Amino acid sequence: MVVNIGFRIVRKILSSSVIRNSFVYVFCDGINKAIPFLLLPFITHYLTPADYGVVTNYNVLVQIVSVFGYLCTAGALPVMFAKLGKEEIKKYVSNMILLNTLANIICVCFALPLYKVIEDALNISFAYQLSVLVLVWFAGITNVNMLLWRCEERPLSFGIYQISQSILNALSTVMFVIVFLLGWQGRIYSMIFTTVAFGLISFFVLYRRGYLGWNIDKAYLKQTLFFALPIIPHALSFWFKSGVDKIYLTNMCSLADNGYYSVALTWGAIVTMFLVSFNNAYAPSLYKKLAAFDLNKAGTMKEQGRLVKFIWISLVVTFIFVVGCYLLSVLLIQVMYPSSYFDSLYFLPWVMLAQFFNGCYLMFVCFAHYTFKTKGLGTITFSLSIAQVGLTYLLILKMGAIGSAVSAAIISAITFVAVAWYAMRVYRLPWFNFKTV
């Protein structure tokens, strides 16, 4: 009897497209992340913690330019994909790429007079700053290509492309860092080479799949801007959370402390990998469900209750998963890394706690995206990110380098609670009523 019930539960789980696609995303993303992740212990024998800190600062600059270069427009595509036909999507994608290109040109104009400030804050020379702008434009093309595969619910194409990019990144890293002994510069060269190569491939793929055209549509440009501009503070909040602390650590502590924290964040990225993979499958399915609810609110109460229950259960599962990842990470860091990197263990508990709340946040932020209520979302996340800037500074003064990780965990928890509350307000569901299930 118990066995039969178990088989029925397994069949029900496997029959869900969200679960099936999640498994594919997790498997492919797992391979994708495992390649550079397994390479990292070898690289650490060729890079000092201070060198790793410089690479981390380069990534910080990539993150902030990406906010303006393509990330803010990207969130609109999955929502519009469910509402438009193929020809309209072609126009929308083409105008999105045009908008991203203009945004990158504006970034260049702003970066030129600020290059000395950036160099002093991040220890990154002007030439490498310019390379960031090139990298971000090509990354934006790849991002559009990957988003379309997600929207089409083609996780296998998405995953194979990811893995191929990661393999090239790893091979070029081995060539530049381990063979040519170029140090931290070699790691940056491999990032640029891989991103440009796959950006060109993505452009070709988009063209062959019929997603590129040359018609400028003012309505779509305006609609994308309507979505993107209010979300810039929201996107910047992630940079404040993951970027400003690196600047603080570099200038208030040391590049080595920055490197230790970054290693802990790398292990925290394991949690992010699984949570984002799940969200890649969850978000398109959620948008379809919400569109069906909008057509018949009264007649879908049972389905609404099931969705709410699914979300709450997912939060519990996320917590159990994060605890398991933390325990495993402690063991593997001591086995895989040279002893000079063991100080990263002090950051790890707080990093994992922050990742848990970030995963919980992902379950709710889609509701704000679906309703295009991005202004309130941006207000919440940007305000809290500003608070994190001040809190991180105070905690580093009081606690040392570990204060950056503590601050990130605290703000992540508050952000999750605030965004969940906001999601419940912008989209009404029986959030606390399970009688409809």
Image: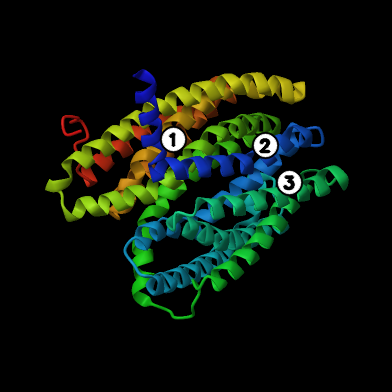
- Residue beneath label 1, please? 358
Cα distance between the residues tagged 2 and 3: 9 Å
Residue farthest left in this picture: 298
Marked residue nearer the N-terminal end (2 or 1): 2
Splitting the image into 4 quarters, where does residue 41 fall? top right
Q: Vertically, is 40 above or below 140?
A: above
Q: How many marks?
A: 3
Horizontal and vertical percent for residue 76? Answer: 38, 59
Residue 26 visible here? yes
Locate the C terminus and report the quarter of the image it occupies. Answer: top left
Please tell me in which quadrant of the rendered image residue 432 appears: top left
Q: Which residue is mark 2?
A: 37
Secondary-structure class at tag 2: helix
The residue that appears at 36% across and 36% down in the rendered structure is 12
Task: State how far apart marks 1 and 3 are (Cα).
Answer: 27 Å
- The residue under label 3 is 170
Amino acid type for the residue under numbered disc 2 = Phe
- Residue 410 at x, y = what percent? 43, 27
Label 2: how many Cα within 10 Å (few below 14, some 14–19, many 20+) = some
Q: Position of residue 257 (x, y in %)?
A: 66, 29
Say whether marks 2 and 1 touch (CB < 8 Å): no
Instruction: Give the class, few, some or many, for how many residues have Cα within 10 Å of label 1's Cα (few <14, many ≥20).
Output: many
Indicate whether 324 appears above or below 154. Answer: above
Q: Decide: marks 2, 3 in contact (CB < 8 A)?
A: no
Residue type, label 1: Asn
SS at mark 3 in the image: helix
Q: Amino acid at mark 3?
A: Ala
Instruction: Say above or below: 138 vs 261.
Output: below
Q: Position of residue 184 (x, y in %)?
A: 76, 44
Q: Earlier in the sequence, mark 1 or mark 3?
A: 3
Q: Residue at x 71, y 37 (%)?
A: 52
